[in-house]
Image (cartoon, rainbow, N blue to C red):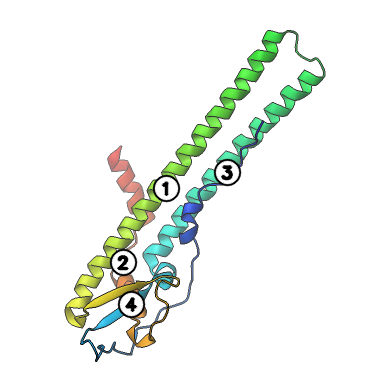
Amino acid sequence: MKKYIFSALAIAAMMVSCNNANSKMDEQPVAADSASGMKIAYVEVDSLMTQYDFAKDYSVTLQKKSNNARNTLTQKGNALQAAVNNFQQKLNNNGFTSREQAASQQAAIERQQRDLQELQARLENELANETAKFNEALRDSLQNFLKAYNKDKQYDLILSKAGDNILMANKKYDITNDVINGLNKHYKPVKKDDAASKKEEKK
């Protein structure tokens, strides 16, 4: 019988790496493209994810949820494997007094296996929903900030640079540090006491 090992929850992996480097304000103004007259800028998504305090805080939360789920599934998977081994040992040593007894224990193991499958699916779904919630909140905070930020800067186009989706870009168009500093300035983390009181109010 297959031993279930928690292999999902990799959804959060893109968010769990935290960089403690301090961002600095971008001192170089972004120049307009003299050929087209367009004023263009871009933001490094990787830097945003590792230096924006909201993203760092949420990544810790997601990591804890991932670890808790993995530990739970590992424990239940080990219990299932122990039950399978015990059943097989009794079967080999004629330890069952009747076929009915053997069938009953086998059915119990199969129920345990189904329960573990359902638990794994539920935990994966919960983490996926939490990750989606984070992505939406991150997108909203970034868009709201850029709307206010661009009232003064007046960029015609602000791009997101992730990996190699932009193959080459002049650093003079990079406003990442400005954006990160602005986001962190406006970010107000929820205190543990506040979070606990909100939970109590919902009860």
Q: Which residue, given by chain and number where applicable, does mark 4 sit on?
A: 42
Q: Secondary structure at mark 3?
A: loop
Which residue does the numbered mark 2 point to in the structure image? Answer: 187
Q: Residues within 10 Å of mark 2 (few under 14, many from 20)?
A: few
Q: CA distance from mark 1 to mark 2?
A: 24 Å
Q: Which label belongs to residue 128?
A: 1
Instruction: Identify residue type, mark 3.
Output: Phe
Q: Nearer the viewer, mark 4 or mark 2?
A: 4
Image coordinates for residue 189, horizontal then vertical, percent: 34, 61
Task: Look at the picture and state if 158 lies above or below 124.
Answer: below
At 33% from the left and 61% from the top, the residue drawn is: 138
Of residues 52 and 105, which is closer to you in this image?
105
Res. 82 mark: none
Q: Which residue is mark 3?
A: 6
Q: CA distance from mark 3 to mark 4?
A: 38 Å
Looking at this view, name the residue that lies furthest to the front: 35
